[in-house]
Image (spheres, rainbow, N blue to C red):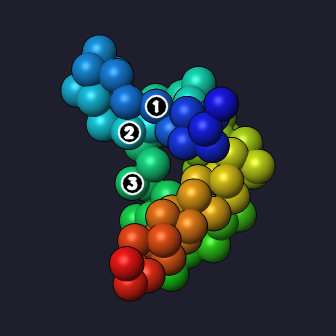
Amino acid sequence: MPRSSRVVHSDPDILGGTPVFVGTRVPVQSLFDYLEAGETLDEFLRQFPSVPRKQAIEALEFARETLLTSARPA
């Protein structure tokens, strides 16, 4: 199973298809918003206890890998 399908889910019936953490209604964008605002991962996890730490870290790793892969010259 691809990492993205274990971590992120998009369903038109859940928040209009906004990507959310699997098993929650927490938008993945919320994690990036927290980090962009200078908050810590721990603060995000305190505010969204339905998101397991492992899942949040996997989302960040997936985003990093995707960015680095797409930034490499062909």
- The answer for how far apart the CA atoms under marks 3 and 2 are is 8 Å
* CB-based contact (under 8 Å), mark 3 and mark 2: yes
- Residue at left 38%, top 39%? 19
- Residue at left 40%, top 71%? 70
Residue type indicated by callout 1 = His
Residue 45 visible within the image: no
- Residue occupied by mark 3: 29
User: Hey, which residue is sitting farthest top in the picture?
Assistant: 13
Residue type indicated by callout 3 = Gln
**Residue 12 in the figure: left or right of residue 6:** left
- Secondary structure beneath label 2: loop
- Residue occupied by mark 1: 9
- Residue occupied by mark 2: 19
Q: Tell me if mark 1 has few (under 14), some (14-19) or many (20+) residues whose alpha carbon lies within 10 angstroms of its own.
A: some
Q: How many marks?
A: 3
Residue type indicated by callout 2 = Pro
Q: Quadrant of the C terminus?
A: bottom left
* Picture layout, residue 8 above or below residue 73: above
Q: Any mark on residue 57, and which?
A: none
Rendered location of residue 38, percent (x, y):
51, 81
- Residue at left 75%, top 51%? 53
Rendered location of residue 54, percent (x, y):
76, 49
* Picture layout, residue 45 above or below residue 66: above
Residue 52 visible within the image: yes
